[in-house]
Amino acid sequence: MCNTFVTAVALVSGASGPSDPVIQRKMAVNWSNWIRQFHRWVSIVLTVTIIVNFAAWTKGPPPAWITYSPLPPLFLLLFSGLYLFALPYARKWRRRQQVGAAAAD
């Protein structure tokens, strides 16, 4: 916990980041977990806005803000989903880069 706080303070203050690979990995895992949780919660918001949209259509044409209310969560899901989709490929690429650099040394 203390190492994470110190690392976060160092990154905010403009330091280049931790040189310890274990801390770097923990920070990457925390970031990925945060994005994953964000993606889950936004999907719930999207589902609720779609249900409200369909319920509003039962009373007649709803106002435009209700009709278009699912779009912001949808775009957030698009970007977080693309990140989550690319994450395993980025990890494989980084591993190959690290193995290649270690073999060159």
Image (cartoon, rainbow, N blue to C red):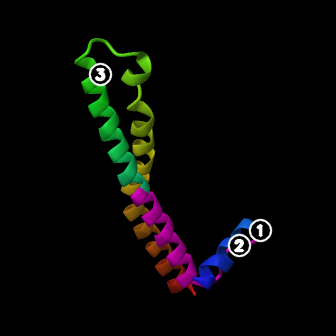
Q: Marks 3 and 1, how far apart in space? A: 49 Å
Residue 13: which numbered mark, if any? 1
Q: Which of marks 3 and 1 is nearer the N terminus?
A: 1
Residue 56: which numbered mark, if any? 3
Q: Which residue is drawn at 27% across and 33% down?
A: 51
The type of residue carrying mark 1 is Ser
| Relative vertical location of residue 17 with respect to residue 1 in this rendering, above or below | above
Tag 2 secondary structure: helix
The type of residue carrying mark 2 is Val
Label 1 neighbour load within 10 Å: few <14, some 14-19, many 20+: few
Residues at badges 1 and 2 in contact (C-beta under 8 Å)? yes
Between residues 51 and 98, which one lies in front from this camera angle? 51
| Relative vertical location of residue 55 with respect to residue 102 in this rendering, above or below | above
Q: Marks 2 and 3, how far apart in space? A: 47 Å
Q: Which of marks 2 and 3 is nearer the N terminus?
A: 2
Q: Farthest top residue? A: 60
Q: Residue at x 31, y 38 (%)?
A: 48
Q: Farthest left residue? A: 58
Q: Which one is closest to the eye, mark 3 or mark 1?
A: 3
The magenta-colored residue range is 13-37
Looking at the image, residue 53 sits to the left or right of residue 87; the answer is: left
Q: Which one is closest to the eye, mark 2 or mark 3?
A: 3
Task: Give the image location of residue 47, x and y in percent.
Answer: 30, 40
Q: Name the residue under label 2.
A: 9
Q: Residue at x 40, y 69 (%)?
A: 92
